[in-house]
Image (tube, coloured by chain):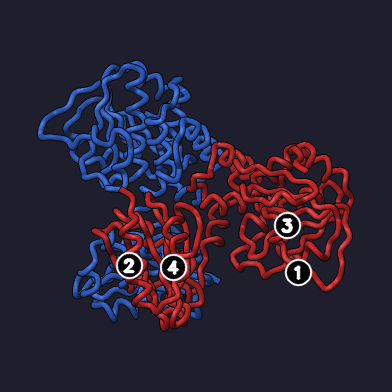
Chain colours: A red, B blue
């Protein structure tokens, strides 16, 4: 059942005990919205627990209250509502079975599966945290440095620090009001941007493989099996390629198996979802991926050929 | 003479013709404030020219009106005011001699030399563009997509896309209001982040030299003379080091001559201005630099020793 912002606030205010959860593989918006809402509800005298069925990313360890987040144990949890934030019901892991309370879902993803008992969805918002901010106003809770820092972190991470197309004047004004509590943006951004030394070293190795193709309209990192095996993560590597002047399609190709390569693509003009789909993958127009069941050199030749044939004019 | 925002607006509105300029080696705030003010003054029927005594960075070519910016010719320029933006008088090159009009200086740098005939200085603002926004309000000019894009770009670049400690709620609200004109933040950020292929390739080479010292509290890129010579720029390279988990002081050392090395430092805790000063350089607590008149290996040993002795607890 779709409900309004006011109805969502009314339900939260009528409850005594709440369990909050968010999607597995949690990001700044998932954790920020759980903690932000938790701090606000506690101000209203509610009993609140946050359950996340996954490990938390290290960069969020600066968030106030991060240590209060629990992993679901092998037991059942009672509450007036299970509040599912920033995700559909099927993305919160075992929490959904372990807590049978009525499901109150708050989300900004257009793709929400709408299976919750009560759903407040606003896809115009850059982050679920932007909705949590609105809920705070609706419930009449004053933001403090704890709730504000949590909510601000979700706004900042989901909007790429206010750079992505989802950023609206409303996002900026919400951030402004939250900052009035004394948030130090440089401390939050420092935490978000922190990388392990191994990751920077790995990126240096990966960047050695950079190649330009199609008169500079395609650029890629091509990591053979040995190099791929040596890397813990390749997160963010493609962004170093995406920013190259004149490049439309950026590729990251990883030989994850001797006979299978994972391809990620980003684009400025070309529809890379179409390219990915033609190879059995999928994604969005500007960010897509697929797996090519071939050895490194062959996969590289194949993907370059398909992209060059599909480049937007 | 120090004047108020209102007096600044009054002077601009009383003038018929104005020449606007900003510092050499212009950045987003210098050019954004010139163009933003130009668009607003033209709306008020003024005759406005922008003179910049330098080449313009390529990433600003997306700005509306960028082609109207002139380099000063070998002649003299007449106007009711020479408006110097985002700089002291001694940083605008030959414009200062070629235009003898009364100097109206608008700046946010605490270090302004206060030599202008009229100075409006507000060091609380993240960017001179934030003052231009306030001037627009004071003069009662409605922002349009042209003036707003210019001003927004200065806000975004000088605040590191709203991440640095100079970003205030006022900065965010100014950006929000400017965005109402239809600014697309993803287009501006894409332009700002664009790098040449050579620069990315150079960064890949430089990153190969990365080293951790002092139990991971110091990290650096150490570019010998050959590598330094092969690079067109090293701008932004130190940021890749600065973000490493646990690193307090990040170093970029370049052997600019066989017997001279240029050192840049960034820090999270340690006072690197003090370190730089002890070696004849200078800067801010968190960002400083110096030149060591020694060959590469010796300079590297020296700087590491001095830093390790000065690390903050």
Q: Which residue is mark 3?
A: A89
Say which of marks 3 and 1 sits in front: 3
Identify the element where label 4 is drawn.
Answer: strand
Q: Return the disc, 4 or 3, that comes first in the chain's sequence.
A: 3
Q: Which residue is mark 1?
A: A71
Q: Are marks 2 and 3 on the same chain?
A: no
Instruction: Name the disc covering residue B203, or none.
Output: 2
User: Which residue is depicted at the point 30% across and 68% down?
Assistant: A211
Return the chain for callout 1: A
Q: Return the disc, 3 or 1, that comes first in the chain's sequence.
A: 1
Residue A32 falls left or right of residue A17: left
Identify the element where label 2 is drawn.
Answer: helix
Identify the element where label 1 is drawn.
Answer: loop
Q: Which residue is mark 4?
A: A263
Return the chain for callout 2: B
Is the residue marked by circle 3 packed among few (<14), some (14-19), or many (20+) residues within 10 Å?
many
Cα separation, mark 4 vs mark 2, equals: 23 Å
């Amino acid at each position: 059942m779709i409900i309004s912002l006011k109805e969502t606030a009314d339900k939260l205010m009528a409850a005594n005990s709440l369990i909050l959860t968010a999607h597995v593989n949690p990001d700044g918006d998932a954790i920020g919205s759980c903690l932000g809402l938790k701090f606000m509800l506690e101000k209203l005298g509610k009993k609140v627990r946050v359950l996340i069925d996954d490990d938390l990313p290290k960069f969020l360890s600066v968030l106030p209250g991060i240590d209060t987040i629990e992993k679901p144990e092998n037991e059942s949890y009672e509450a007036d509502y299970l509040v599912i934030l920033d995700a559909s019901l099927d993305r919160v892991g075992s929490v959904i079975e372990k807590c049978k309370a009525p499901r109150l879902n708050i989300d900004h993803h257009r793709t929400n599966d709408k299976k919750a008992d009560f759903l407040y969805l606003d896809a115009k918002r850059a982050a679920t945290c932007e909705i949590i901010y609105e809920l705070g106003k609706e419930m009449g809770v004053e933001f403090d440095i704890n709730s504000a820092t949590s909510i601000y972190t979700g706004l900042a991470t989901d909007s790429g620090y206010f750079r992505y197309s989802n950023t609206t004047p409303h996002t900026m004004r919400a951030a402004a009001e939250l900052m009035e509590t004394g948030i130090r943006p440089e401390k939050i951004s420092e935490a978000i941007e922190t990388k392990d030394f191994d990751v920077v070293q790995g990126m240096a190795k990966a960047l050695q493989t950079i190649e330009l193709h199609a008169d500079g309209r395609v650029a890629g990192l091509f990591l053979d099996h040995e190099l791929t095996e040596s890397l813990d993560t390749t997160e963010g590597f493609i962004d170093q390629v995406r920013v190259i002047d004149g490049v439309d399609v950026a590729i990251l190709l990883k030989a994850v198996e001797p006979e299978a390569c994972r391809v990620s693509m980003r684009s400025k003009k070309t529809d890379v979802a179409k390219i990915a789909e033609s190879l059995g993958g999928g994604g969005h127009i500007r960010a897509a991926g697929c797996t090519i069941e071939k050895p490194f050199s062959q996969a590289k030749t194949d993907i370059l050929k398909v992209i060059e044939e599909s480049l937007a004019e």
